Image (cartoon, helix red, strand yellow):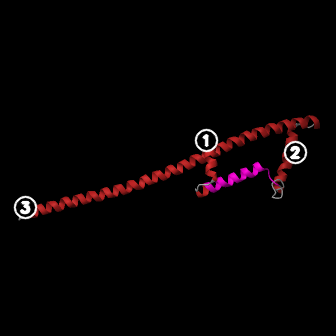
């Protein structure tokens, strides 16, 4: 009888040990699955961030180039006006910038009554689409524009 009870005790110990290892394996697998899902989620978020950064850098590059062109145009016209008016180009730039700043303060330049050029309307719509995409994370036209921007930047 002793060997039978020893055998039963041995079998119970083996079953208890295996179920303990099974519980440890189940816990490990569950945690691993959470980690894998988390990593996949981070990869998707990282991909979106990279697209957004590339899009922003592309637009920033375009803006810097446009600003350079405008500054060259400003300098050229200021020098021409200075030659015709008898003042220095810096005086002319300062006077015109003061007038433009006053217009911005009165909001005369971008009032809703005046029509904006098609390009400006398109740019403002694209900015709104990108903002909506960043806030919601949902796919939209902005996502296609971002991917196109990434391809152009690459």
Q: Position of residue 138 (x, y in %)?
A: 58, 56
Q: Residues within 10 Å of mark 2 (few under 14, many from 20)?
A: few
Q: Secondary structure at mark 1?
A: helix
Predominant secondary structure in magenta?
Answer: helix
- Say if mark 2 contacts mark 3, CB within 8 Å: no
Depth check, mark 1 against mark 3: the one in front is 1
Residue at the farthest right position: 85
Q: Position of residue 109 (x, y in %)?
A: 83, 53
- Residue beneath disc 2: 95
Give the distance between the C-alpha atoms of the residues marked 2 and 1, in whole angstroms: 43 Å
Q: Position of residue 111 (x, y in %)?
A: 82, 57
Q: Which residues are magenta?
A: 115-133
Give the distance between the C-alpha atoms of the residues marked 2 and 3, in whole angstroms: 109 Å
Left or right: 8 as drawn, with respect to 95: left
Residue plotted at (34% across, 58% down)? 27
Q: Secondary structure at mark 2?
A: helix
Residue 59 in the magenta stretch? The answer is no
Give the camera-side residue of 118 and 35.
Answer: 118
Residue plotted at (83% across, 39% down)? 74
Depth check, mark 2 against mark 3: the one in front is 3
- Say if mark 2 contacts mark 1, CB within 8 Å: no
As drawn, the label of residue 151 is 1
Vertical arrangement, residue 70 with respect to residue 11, above or below: above
Residue at the farthest left position: 1
Left or right: 32 as drawn, with respect to 139: left
Q: Residues within 10 Å of mark 3 (few under 14, many from 20)?
A: few
Give the camera-side residue of 19 and 103.
Answer: 19
Q: Secondary structure at mark 3?
A: helix
Residue plotted at (94% across, 36% down)? 84
Picture quarter with the N terminus:
bottom left
């Amino acid at each position: 009888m002793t060997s039978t009870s020893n055998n039963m005790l041995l079998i119970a110990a083996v079953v208890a040990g295996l179920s303990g290892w099974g519980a440890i394996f189940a816990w490990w697998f569950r945690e691993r699955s959470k980690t894998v899902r988390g990593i996949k989620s981070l990869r998707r978020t990282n991909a979106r961030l990279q697209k957004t950064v590339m899009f922003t850098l592309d637009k920033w590059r375009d803006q810097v180039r446009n600003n350079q062109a405008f500054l060259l145009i400003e300098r050229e016209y200021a020098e021409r006006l200075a030659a015709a008016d008898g003042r220095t180009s810096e005086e002319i730039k300062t006077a015109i910038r003061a007038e433009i700043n006053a217009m911005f303060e009165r909001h005369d330049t971008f009032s809703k009554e005046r029509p904006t050029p098609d390009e400006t309307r398109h740019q403002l719509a694209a900015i709104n689409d990108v903002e909506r995409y960043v806030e919601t994370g949902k796919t939209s036209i902005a996502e296609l524009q971002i991917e196109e921007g990434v391809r152009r930047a690459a």
